[in-house]
Protein backbone atom coordinates (compact mmCIF):
# COMPACT_ATOMS: atom_id res chain seq x y z
CA UNK A 1 0.00 0.00 0.00
CA UNK A 2 1.18 3.55 -0.68
CA UNK A 3 2.85 4.95 2.46
CA UNK A 4 1.14 8.35 2.35
CA UNK A 5 -2.24 6.69 1.99
CA UNK A 6 -1.68 4.37 4.95
CA UNK A 7 -0.56 7.30 7.09
CA UNK A 8 -3.75 9.15 6.24
CA UNK A 9 -5.76 6.05 7.09
CA UNK A 10 -4.07 5.77 10.47
CA UNK A 11 -4.90 9.39 11.23
CA UNK A 12 -8.57 8.65 10.64
CA UNK A 13 -8.56 6.11 13.45
CA UNK A 14 -6.45 7.83 16.08
CA UNK A 15 -5.96 11.49 16.85
CA UNK A 16 -2.51 13.01 17.25
CA UNK A 17 -2.60 13.13 21.05
CA UNK A 18 -3.50 9.44 21.31
CA UNK A 19 -0.94 8.52 18.69
CA UNK A 20 2.06 9.94 20.59
CA UNK A 21 1.01 8.06 23.73
CA UNK A 22 1.57 4.72 21.99
CA UNK A 23 4.79 2.85 22.38
CA UNK A 24 7.18 3.28 19.48
CA UNK A 25 6.48 -0.20 18.09
CA UNK A 26 2.72 0.16 18.38
CA UNK A 27 2.80 3.58 16.76
CA UNK A 28 4.80 2.20 13.87
CA UNK A 29 2.40 -0.68 13.39
CA UNK A 30 -0.56 1.67 13.46
CA UNK A 31 1.06 3.94 10.92
CA UNK A 32 1.73 1.15 8.44
CA UNK A 33 -1.74 -0.32 8.79
CA UNK A 34 -0.93 -3.50 10.76
CA UNK A 35 -3.01 -2.28 13.70
CA UNK A 36 -6.32 -0.45 13.60
CA UNK A 37 -8.15 1.49 16.27
CA UNK A 38 -11.90 0.97 16.35
CA UNK A 39 -13.25 4.41 17.09
CA UNK A 40 -16.58 3.55 15.51
CA UNK A 41 -17.49 1.56 18.61
CA UNK A 42 -15.95 4.10 20.97
CA UNK A 43 -13.26 1.69 22.14
CA UNK A 44 -9.63 2.49 22.82
CA UNK A 45 -8.02 -0.94 22.46
CA UNK A 46 -5.75 -1.75 19.55
CA UNK A 47 -6.26 -5.01 17.70
CA UNK A 48 -4.39 -6.41 14.72
CA UNK A 49 -6.15 -6.34 11.43
CA UNK A 50 -6.60 -9.77 9.83
CA UNK A 51 -3.88 -10.73 7.40
CA UNK A 52 -6.51 -12.49 5.31
CA UNK A 53 -10.29 -12.60 4.93
CA UNK A 54 -12.33 -15.59 3.78
CA UNK A 55 -15.94 -14.85 2.86
CA UNK A 56 -17.98 -18.03 2.46
CA UNK A 57 -21.25 -17.52 0.65
CA UNK A 58 -23.91 -20.22 0.47
CA UNK A 59 -27.13 -20.31 -1.52
CA UNK A 60 -30.57 -20.90 -0.02
CA UNK A 61 -29.41 -21.98 3.44
CA UNK A 62 -32.04 -22.16 6.17
CA UNK A 63 -30.70 -20.68 9.39
CA UNK A 64 -31.36 -23.81 11.47
CA UNK A 65 -29.01 -26.16 9.63
CA UNK A 66 -26.01 -26.40 11.94
CA UNK A 67 -25.68 -29.28 14.36
CA UNK A 68 -23.78 -27.17 16.90
CA UNK A 69 -26.61 -24.65 16.70
CA UNK A 70 -29.16 -27.25 17.76
CA UNK A 71 -30.27 -28.88 14.50
CA UNK A 72 -30.74 -32.60 15.22
CA UNK A 73 -31.09 -33.66 11.58
CA UNK A 74 -27.63 -32.91 10.20
CA UNK A 75 -23.98 -33.77 10.71
CA UNK A 76 -21.99 -30.59 10.00
CA UNK A 77 -18.43 -30.66 11.39
CA UNK A 78 -17.22 -27.71 9.29
CA UNK A 79 -20.16 -25.46 10.11
CA UNK A 80 -19.91 -26.58 13.74
CA UNK A 81 -16.30 -25.45 13.79
CA UNK A 82 -17.21 -21.98 12.57
CA UNK A 83 -20.12 -21.79 14.97
CA UNK A 84 -18.11 -22.74 18.07
CA UNK A 85 -15.03 -20.67 17.20
CA UNK A 86 -16.82 -17.37 16.78
CA UNK A 87 -20.09 -15.45 16.87
CA UNK A 88 -23.31 -16.54 15.17
CA UNK A 89 -26.28 -14.23 14.78
CA UNK A 90 -29.69 -15.86 14.99
CA UNK A 91 -31.62 -12.70 14.06
CA UNK A 92 -29.75 -12.29 10.79
CA UNK A 93 -31.85 -11.30 7.78
CA UNK A 94 -31.34 -11.27 4.06
CA UNK A 95 -31.54 -7.76 2.62
CA UNK A 96 -33.77 -9.26 -0.06
CA UNK A 97 -34.64 -13.00 0.03
CA UNK A 98 -33.87 -13.54 -3.67
CA UNK A 99 -30.50 -14.60 -5.11
CA UNK A 100 -29.10 -11.68 -7.12
CA UNK A 101 -30.69 -8.85 -5.10
CA UNK A 102 -29.37 -10.30 -1.83
CA UNK A 103 -25.89 -10.77 -3.29
CA UNK A 104 -25.76 -7.20 -4.53
CA UNK A 105 -26.59 -5.98 -1.03
CA UNK A 106 -23.93 -8.10 0.70
CA UNK A 107 -21.21 -7.09 -1.74
CA UNK A 108 -22.00 -3.36 -1.63
CA UNK A 109 -23.67 -2.60 1.71
CA UNK A 110 -26.48 -0.93 -0.26
CA UNK A 111 -30.09 -2.01 -0.70
CA UNK A 112 -31.09 -3.98 -3.76
CA UNK A 113 -33.28 -1.18 -5.12
CA UNK A 114 -30.28 1.18 -4.84
CA UNK A 115 -27.89 -1.24 -6.58
CA UNK A 116 -30.41 -1.64 -9.45
CA UNK A 117 -30.48 -5.40 -8.79
CA UNK A 118 -34.17 -5.58 -7.95
CA UNK A 119 -34.57 -8.99 -9.68
CA UNK A 120 -32.23 -11.83 -10.62
CA UNK A 121 -29.69 -11.42 -13.39
CA UNK A 122 -28.96 -7.68 -13.25
CA UNK A 123 -25.63 -5.91 -12.77
CA UNK A 124 -24.75 -3.65 -9.88
CA UNK A 125 -24.92 -0.04 -11.04
CA UNK A 126 -21.50 1.24 -12.04
CA UNK A 127 -21.17 4.07 -9.52
CA UNK A 128 -21.50 1.74 -6.50
CA UNK A 129 -18.27 -0.17 -5.76
CA UNK A 130 -18.46 -3.81 -4.78
CA UNK A 131 -16.31 -5.31 -2.03
CA UNK A 132 -13.55 -6.40 -4.40
CA UNK A 133 -13.33 -3.03 -6.11
CA UNK A 134 -13.27 -1.14 -2.82
CA UNK A 135 -10.59 -3.33 -1.22
CA UNK A 136 -8.49 -3.16 -4.40
CA UNK A 137 -8.64 0.62 -4.32
CA UNK A 138 -8.26 1.23 -0.61
CA UNK A 139 -6.04 -1.59 0.72
CA UNK A 140 -3.14 -3.84 -0.19
CA UNK A 141 -5.34 -6.96 -0.04
CA UNK A 142 -5.43 -9.01 -3.20
CA UNK A 143 -9.01 -9.94 -3.99
CA UNK A 144 -10.07 -13.29 -5.40
CA UNK A 145 -13.41 -14.90 -6.24
CA UNK A 146 -14.48 -18.49 -6.78
CA UNK A 147 -17.91 -19.87 -7.60
CA UNK A 148 -21.35 -18.39 -8.15
CA UNK A 149 -21.61 -14.65 -8.84
CA UNK A 150 -25.06 -14.09 -10.44
CA UNK A 151 -24.57 -10.33 -10.96
CA UNK A 152 -25.64 -10.74 -13.71
CA UNK A 153 -24.22 -14.09 -14.90
CA UNK A 154 -24.33 -17.02 -12.53
CA UNK A 155 -20.80 -18.18 -13.41
CA UNK A 156 -18.32 -15.92 -15.14
CA UNK A 157 -14.61 -15.15 -15.32
CA UNK A 158 -15.30 -11.42 -15.38
CA UNK A 159 -16.14 -10.03 -11.91
CA UNK A 160 -15.19 -6.36 -11.36
CA UNK A 161 -12.63 -5.97 -8.60
CA UNK A 162 -11.79 -9.68 -8.31
CA UNK A 163 -9.41 -12.14 -9.90
CA UNK A 164 -11.58 -15.17 -10.65
CA UNK A 165 -9.95 -18.48 -9.77
CA UNK A 166 -12.91 -20.72 -10.60
CA UNK A 167 -15.98 -20.03 -12.72
CA UNK A 168 -17.93 -23.19 -11.96
CA UNK A 169 -18.89 -25.96 -14.34
CA UNK A 170 -22.66 -25.66 -14.40
CA UNK A 171 -25.71 -24.75 -12.40
CA UNK A 172 -25.78 -27.71 -10.04
CA UNK A 173 -24.05 -27.65 -6.68
CA UNK A 174 -23.28 -31.35 -6.63
CA UNK A 175 -20.93 -30.69 -9.58
CA UNK A 176 -19.72 -27.11 -9.37
CA UNK A 177 -19.22 -26.85 -5.60
CA UNK A 178 -16.64 -29.62 -5.58
CA UNK A 179 -14.75 -27.98 -8.44
CA UNK A 180 -14.93 -24.64 -6.65
CA UNK A 181 -13.76 -25.91 -3.26
CA UNK A 182 -10.86 -27.75 -4.89
CA UNK A 183 -9.84 -24.56 -6.70
CA UNK A 184 -9.88 -22.70 -3.37
CA UNK A 185 -7.88 -25.51 -1.80
CA UNK A 186 -5.26 -25.27 -4.54
CA UNK A 187 -5.15 -21.50 -4.19
CA UNK A 188 -4.57 -21.68 -0.43
CA UNK A 189 -1.97 -24.46 -0.56
CA UNK A 190 0.14 -22.85 -3.27
CA UNK A 191 -0.21 -19.11 -2.75
CA UNK A 192 2.72 -16.97 -1.62
CA UNK A 193 2.19 -15.39 1.78
CA UNK A 194 3.76 -12.10 0.71
CA UNK A 195 0.46 -10.22 0.45
CA UNK A 196 -2.82 -10.39 2.36
CA UNK A 197 -5.83 -11.70 0.51
CA UNK A 198 -9.59 -11.49 0.50
CA UNK A 199 -11.08 -14.68 -0.93
CA UNK A 200 -14.79 -15.05 -1.64
CA UNK A 201 -15.84 -18.71 -1.94
CA UNK A 202 -19.40 -18.80 -3.23
CA UNK A 203 -21.24 -22.13 -3.17
CA UNK A 204 -24.33 -23.22 -5.06
CA UNK A 205 -25.53 -25.62 -2.37
CA UNK A 206 -28.03 -26.18 -0.86
CA UNK A 207 -29.74 -24.56 -3.87
CA UNK A 208 -29.93 -28.00 -5.50
CA UNK A 209 -33.09 -28.51 -3.45
CA UNK A 210 -34.78 -26.55 -6.24
CA UNK A 211 -33.90 -29.32 -8.68
CA UNK A 212 -35.04 -31.92 -6.13
CA UNK A 213 -38.40 -30.13 -5.96
CA UNK A 214 -38.77 -30.25 -9.73
CA UNK A 215 -37.87 -33.94 -9.90
CA UNK A 216 -40.10 -34.85 -6.95
CA UNK A 217 -43.01 -32.52 -7.57
CA UNK A 218 -45.62 -35.25 -8.01
CA UNK A 219 -46.36 -37.21 -4.88
CA UNK A 220 -46.28 -40.93 -5.79
CA UNK A 221 -48.59 -41.77 -2.91
CA UNK A 222 -45.96 -43.70 -1.00
CA UNK A 223 -42.48 -43.04 0.35
CA UNK A 224 -39.94 -43.61 -2.41
CA UNK A 225 -37.52 -45.22 0.02
CA UNK A 226 -39.53 -47.00 2.75
CA UNK A 227 -36.39 -47.57 4.80
CA UNK A 228 -36.30 -43.81 5.53
CA UNK A 229 -39.63 -43.83 7.34
CA UNK A 230 -38.07 -43.73 10.79
CA UNK A 231 -35.61 -40.98 9.88
CA UNK A 232 -37.90 -38.34 8.44
CA UNK A 233 -37.98 -35.04 10.39
CA UNK A 234 -41.29 -34.00 11.89
CA UNK A 235 -43.25 -31.18 10.33
CA UNK A 236 -42.66 -27.73 11.84
CA UNK A 237 -45.05 -26.41 14.47
CA UNK A 238 -46.12 -23.62 12.10
CA UNK A 239 -46.88 -25.93 9.18
CA UNK A 240 -50.38 -24.46 8.76
CA UNK A 241 -50.88 -21.00 7.30
CA UNK A 242 -53.16 -17.99 7.59
CA UNK A 243 -55.79 -17.89 4.85
CA UNK A 244 -55.83 -14.07 5.09
CA UNK A 245 -52.29 -13.45 3.90
CA UNK A 246 -51.09 -10.86 1.41
CA UNK A 247 -51.85 -11.98 -2.13
CA UNK A 248 -48.14 -12.08 -3.04
CA UNK A 249 -47.47 -14.65 -0.33
CA UNK A 250 -50.48 -16.77 -1.21
CA UNK A 251 -49.62 -16.78 -4.91
CA UNK A 252 -46.04 -17.75 -4.15
CA UNK A 253 -47.22 -20.76 -2.16
CA UNK A 254 -49.71 -21.93 -4.77
CA UNK A 255 -47.10 -21.64 -7.53
CA UNK A 256 -44.67 -24.01 -5.85
CA UNK A 257 -44.34 -27.77 -6.29
CA UNK A 258 -46.18 -29.06 -3.18
CA UNK A 259 -49.49 -27.59 -4.28
CA UNK A 260 -49.00 -28.58 -7.90
CA UNK A 261 -48.02 -32.11 -6.92
CA UNK A 262 -50.66 -32.74 -4.23
CA UNK A 263 -48.22 -33.48 -1.43
CA UNK A 264 -49.25 -35.29 1.71
CA UNK A 265 -47.51 -34.82 5.06
CA UNK A 266 -45.15 -37.72 4.49
CA UNK A 267 -43.92 -36.18 1.25
CA UNK A 268 -43.36 -32.89 3.06
CA UNK A 269 -41.22 -34.74 5.60
CA UNK A 270 -39.29 -36.48 2.82
CA UNK A 271 -38.50 -33.07 1.30
CA UNK A 272 -37.20 -31.82 4.66
CA UNK A 273 -35.00 -34.91 5.03
CA UNK A 274 -33.61 -34.39 1.53
CA UNK A 275 -32.80 -30.74 2.15
CA UNK A 276 -30.63 -31.69 5.11
CA UNK A 277 -28.60 -34.00 2.85
CA UNK A 278 -27.82 -31.04 0.61
CA UNK A 279 -26.58 -29.19 3.70
CA UNK A 280 -24.22 -32.06 4.50
CA UNK A 281 -22.77 -31.93 0.99
CA UNK A 282 -22.18 -28.20 1.43
CA UNK A 283 -20.51 -28.82 4.80
CA UNK A 284 -18.05 -31.30 3.30
CA UNK A 285 -16.93 -28.78 0.68
CA UNK A 286 -16.57 -26.02 3.27
CA UNK A 287 -14.50 -28.46 5.32
CA UNK A 288 -12.10 -28.91 2.41
CA UNK A 289 -11.38 -25.16 2.35
CA UNK A 290 -10.99 -24.91 6.13
CA UNK A 291 -8.55 -27.82 6.13
CA UNK A 292 -6.42 -26.15 3.47
CA UNK A 293 -6.54 -22.89 5.41
CA UNK A 294 -5.29 -24.65 8.53
CA UNK A 295 -2.69 -26.84 6.82
CA UNK A 296 -1.15 -23.79 5.15
CA UNK A 297 -0.90 -21.93 8.47
CA UNK A 298 -3.47 -19.26 7.62
CA UNK A 299 -6.12 -20.12 10.18
CA UNK A 300 -4.88 -17.87 13.03
CA UNK A 301 -4.52 -14.85 10.76
CA UNK A 302 -7.78 -15.13 8.83
CA UNK A 303 -11.14 -13.57 9.60
CA UNK A 304 -13.80 -15.97 8.29
CA UNK A 305 -17.34 -14.83 7.50
CA UNK A 306 -20.15 -17.14 6.41
CA UNK A 307 -23.57 -16.08 5.25
CA UNK A 308 -26.23 -16.93 2.65
CA UNK A 309 -28.32 -15.00 0.15
CA UNK A 310 -31.66 -16.25 1.53
CA UNK A 311 -33.19 -19.13 3.43
CA UNK A 312 -35.50 -22.00 2.48
CA UNK A 313 -39.19 -22.46 3.29
CA UNK A 314 -38.70 -25.97 4.74
CA UNK A 315 -42.44 -26.52 5.09
CA UNK A 316 -43.05 -23.67 7.52
CA UNK A 317 -46.37 -22.10 6.50
CA UNK A 318 -46.35 -24.84 3.81
CA UNK A 319 -43.75 -22.86 1.88
CA UNK A 320 -40.72 -24.00 -0.08
CA UNK A 321 -37.95 -22.01 -1.70
CA UNK A 322 -37.44 -18.25 -1.19
CA UNK A 323 -39.14 -14.88 -1.93
CA UNK A 324 -41.01 -14.70 1.36
CA UNK A 325 -40.66 -12.47 4.40
CA UNK A 326 -41.47 -15.30 6.76
CA UNK A 327 -38.39 -16.05 8.83
CA UNK A 328 -37.68 -19.36 7.13
CA UNK A 329 -36.90 -17.64 3.81
CA UNK A 330 -35.80 -14.27 5.16
CA UNK A 331 -33.41 -15.29 7.95
CA UNK A 332 -29.95 -16.52 7.01
CA UNK A 333 -26.86 -17.77 8.84
CA UNK A 334 -24.29 -15.09 9.67
CA UNK A 335 -21.14 -16.42 11.35
CA UNK A 336 -17.84 -14.70 12.12
CA UNK A 337 -14.79 -16.67 13.23
CA UNK A 338 -11.34 -15.42 14.18
CA UNK A 339 -10.19 -17.23 17.35
CA UNK A 340 -8.19 -15.09 19.73
CA UNK A 341 -9.60 -11.86 18.32
CA UNK A 342 -13.38 -12.17 18.52
CA UNK A 343 -15.60 -13.86 21.08
CA UNK A 344 -15.81 -17.63 20.70
CA UNK A 345 -18.89 -19.86 20.79
CA UNK A 346 -21.30 -16.97 21.21
CA UNK A 347 -24.85 -17.06 19.89
CA UNK A 348 -26.24 -13.55 19.53
CA UNK A 349 -30.03 -13.42 19.57
CA UNK A 350 -30.25 -9.83 20.78
CA UNK A 351 -29.33 -7.87 17.67
CA UNK A 352 -31.32 -7.88 14.42
CA UNK A 353 -28.64 -7.75 11.73
CA UNK A 354 -28.57 -7.79 7.95
CA UNK A 355 -26.51 -8.81 4.97
CA UNK A 356 -25.99 -5.06 4.58
CA UNK A 357 -23.72 -5.21 7.63
CA UNK A 358 -21.06 -7.43 6.06
CA UNK A 359 -19.23 -4.79 4.02
CA UNK A 360 -19.00 -2.11 6.74
CA UNK A 361 -17.80 -4.76 9.21
CA UNK A 362 -14.99 -5.89 6.91
CA UNK A 363 -13.99 -2.30 6.18
CA UNK A 364 -13.86 -1.62 9.91
CA UNK A 365 -11.60 -4.61 10.52
CA UNK A 366 -9.02 -3.60 7.93
CA UNK A 367 -9.01 0.04 9.01
CA UNK A 368 -10.58 1.78 6.04
CA UNK A 369 -13.67 3.90 5.67
CA UNK A 370 -16.68 2.29 4.05
CA UNK A 371 -17.99 3.59 0.74
CA UNK A 372 -20.53 6.38 0.97
CA UNK A 373 -24.13 5.76 1.97
CA UNK A 374 -23.73 2.40 3.68
CA UNK A 375 -27.13 1.11 4.85
CA UNK A 376 -25.60 -1.41 7.22
CA UNK A 377 -23.47 -1.03 10.34
CA UNK A 378 -20.20 -2.52 11.49
CA UNK A 379 -20.73 -5.46 13.85
CA UNK A 380 -17.17 -5.39 15.14
CA UNK A 381 -18.09 -4.18 18.62
CA UNK A 382 -20.45 -7.11 19.11
CA UNK A 383 -17.89 -9.56 17.76
CA UNK A 384 -15.35 -8.37 20.30
CA UNK A 385 -17.75 -8.57 23.25
CA UNK A 386 -18.63 -4.89 23.52
CA UNK A 387 -21.84 -2.94 23.22
CA UNK A 388 -23.13 -3.20 19.69
CA UNK A 389 -24.57 -0.63 17.30
CA UNK A 390 -27.94 0.81 18.24
CA UNK A 391 -30.59 0.65 15.56
CA UNK A 392 -34.36 0.84 15.59
CA UNK A 393 -34.83 -1.78 12.91
CA UNK A 394 -33.51 -3.50 9.83
CA UNK A 395 -35.42 -3.56 6.54
CA UNK A 396 -35.60 -6.23 3.84
CA UNK A 397 -36.91 -5.66 0.33
CA UNK A 398 -38.94 -7.94 -1.91
CA UNK A 399 -38.55 -9.11 -5.47
CA UNK A 400 -39.16 -6.35 -8.05
CA UNK A 401 -39.28 -3.85 -5.18
CA UNK A 402 -42.91 -4.82 -4.49
CA UNK A 403 -42.71 -5.58 -0.78
CA UNK A 404 -40.77 -4.63 2.32
CA UNK A 405 -40.27 -6.03 5.78
CA UNK A 406 -39.38 -4.09 8.93
CA UNK A 407 -37.78 -6.10 11.74
CA UNK A 408 -37.39 -4.32 15.06
CA UNK A 409 -36.24 -5.79 18.34
CA UNK A 410 -39.65 -7.19 19.20
CA UNK A 411 -41.82 -6.99 16.07
CA UNK A 412 -41.98 -7.72 12.36
CA UNK A 413 -44.05 -5.64 9.95
CA UNK A 414 -44.70 -6.67 6.31
CA UNK A 415 -46.23 -4.58 3.57
CA UNK A 416 -46.74 -5.24 -0.16
CA UNK A 417 -47.65 -2.62 -2.70
CA UNK A 418 -51.28 -2.47 -3.89
CA UNK A 419 -52.37 -4.84 -1.13
CA UNK A 420 -54.48 -3.84 1.83
CA UNK A 421 -53.38 -6.84 3.90
CA UNK A 422 -50.48 -5.91 6.14
CA UNK A 423 -48.84 -8.20 8.67
CA UNK A 424 -47.57 -7.51 12.17
CA UNK A 425 -46.05 -10.27 14.28
CA UNK A 426 -44.91 -10.39 17.89
CA UNK A 427 -41.58 -12.12 17.34
CA UNK A 428 -40.92 -12.64 21.04
CA UNK A 429 -44.14 -14.46 21.84
CA UNK A 430 -44.99 -15.76 18.37
CA UNK A 431 -41.69 -16.60 16.63
CA UNK A 432 -43.56 -18.89 14.23
CA UNK A 433 -45.47 -15.89 12.84
CA UNK A 434 -48.88 -17.48 13.23
CA UNK A 435 -50.95 -14.53 14.54
CA UNK A 436 -51.28 -11.40 12.43
CA UNK A 437 -51.98 -8.55 14.88
CA UNK A 438 -52.83 -5.75 12.45
CA UNK A 439 -56.60 -6.08 13.03
CA UNK A 440 -56.33 -5.61 16.78
CA UNK A 441 -56.72 -2.04 18.09
CA UNK A 442 -54.43 -3.01 20.95
CA UNK A 443 -51.49 -2.97 18.53
CA UNK A 444 -52.49 0.09 16.50
CA UNK A 445 -49.72 2.28 17.91
CA UNK A 446 -47.09 -0.38 17.22
CA UNK A 447 -48.37 -0.78 13.68
CA UNK A 448 -48.20 2.99 13.12
CA UNK A 449 -44.68 3.10 14.56
CA UNK A 450 -43.45 0.47 12.12
CA UNK A 451 -45.16 2.12 9.18
CA UNK A 452 -43.25 5.26 10.15
CA UNK A 453 -39.98 3.31 10.41
CA UNK A 454 -40.48 2.05 6.86
CA UNK A 455 -41.27 5.50 5.54
CA UNK A 456 -38.18 6.99 7.20
CA UNK A 457 -35.99 4.19 5.84
CA UNK A 458 -37.27 4.73 2.33
CA UNK A 459 -36.71 8.48 2.53
CA UNK A 460 -32.95 7.95 2.94
CA UNK A 461 -32.48 5.71 -0.09
CA UNK A 462 -30.82 6.72 -3.34
CA UNK A 463 -33.00 4.81 -5.79
CA UNK A 464 -32.47 5.16 -9.56
CA UNK A 465 -35.51 6.42 -11.41
CA UNK A 466 -35.69 3.34 -13.65
CA UNK A 467 -36.38 0.91 -10.76
CA UNK A 468 -39.93 -0.51 -10.86
CA UNK A 469 -42.27 0.80 -8.17
CA UNK A 470 -39.75 3.45 -7.17
CA UNK A 471 -42.48 5.86 -6.02
CA UNK A 472 -44.74 3.32 -4.32
CA UNK A 473 -43.18 3.70 -0.89
CA UNK A 474 -43.13 7.51 -1.05
CA UNK A 475 -46.80 7.58 -1.91
CA UNK A 476 -47.87 5.31 0.92
CA UNK A 477 -48.96 6.90 4.19
Image (cartoon, helix red, strand yellow):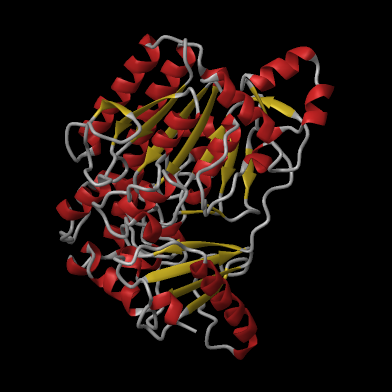
Q: Nearer the viewer, residue 235 or 455?
A: 455
Task: Name the one closer to the observer, 406 or 213.
Answer: 406
Which residue is most to the bottom? 441
Give the side of residue 198 with respect to residue 273, left or right: right
- Residue under the point 52% across and 65% down: 460
Residue 363 in percent (x, y) is at 55, 37
Position above or below: 217 against 130? below
Question: How far across and how far down the image is residue 406, in percent?
Answer: 52, 67
- From the viewer's perspective, tell me whether residue 452 is left or right of residue 340: left
Q: Nearer the viewer, residue 123 or 137?
A: 137
Which quarter of the picture shows residue 24?
top right
Image point (47%, 37%), residue name: 306
**Quarter location, residue 301:** top right
Depth order, front residue of 376/240: 376
Above or below 54: residue 252:
below
In percent of width and height, residue 155 lies at: 22, 37
Residue 407: percent from left, percent from top: 55, 65
- Let me know if residue 37 appears in the view: no
- Can residue 292 be seen in the rendering of this structure? yes
Q: Is residue 405 above or below residue 158?
A: below
Amino acid sequence: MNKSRTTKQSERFVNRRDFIKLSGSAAALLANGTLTRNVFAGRQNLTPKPKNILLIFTDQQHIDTIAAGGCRHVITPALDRLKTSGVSFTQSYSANPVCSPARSAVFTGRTSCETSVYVNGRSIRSDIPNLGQWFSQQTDYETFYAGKWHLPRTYTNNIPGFKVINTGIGGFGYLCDTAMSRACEGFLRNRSKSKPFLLAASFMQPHDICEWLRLNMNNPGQLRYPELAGELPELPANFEFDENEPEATRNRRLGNEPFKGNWNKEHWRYYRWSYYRHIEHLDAEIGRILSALEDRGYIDDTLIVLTSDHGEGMGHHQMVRKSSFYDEAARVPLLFSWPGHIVENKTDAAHPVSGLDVMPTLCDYVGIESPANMRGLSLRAILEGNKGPQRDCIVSEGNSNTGRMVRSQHWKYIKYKDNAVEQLFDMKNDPGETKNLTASSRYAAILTEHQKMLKEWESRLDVPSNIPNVDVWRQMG
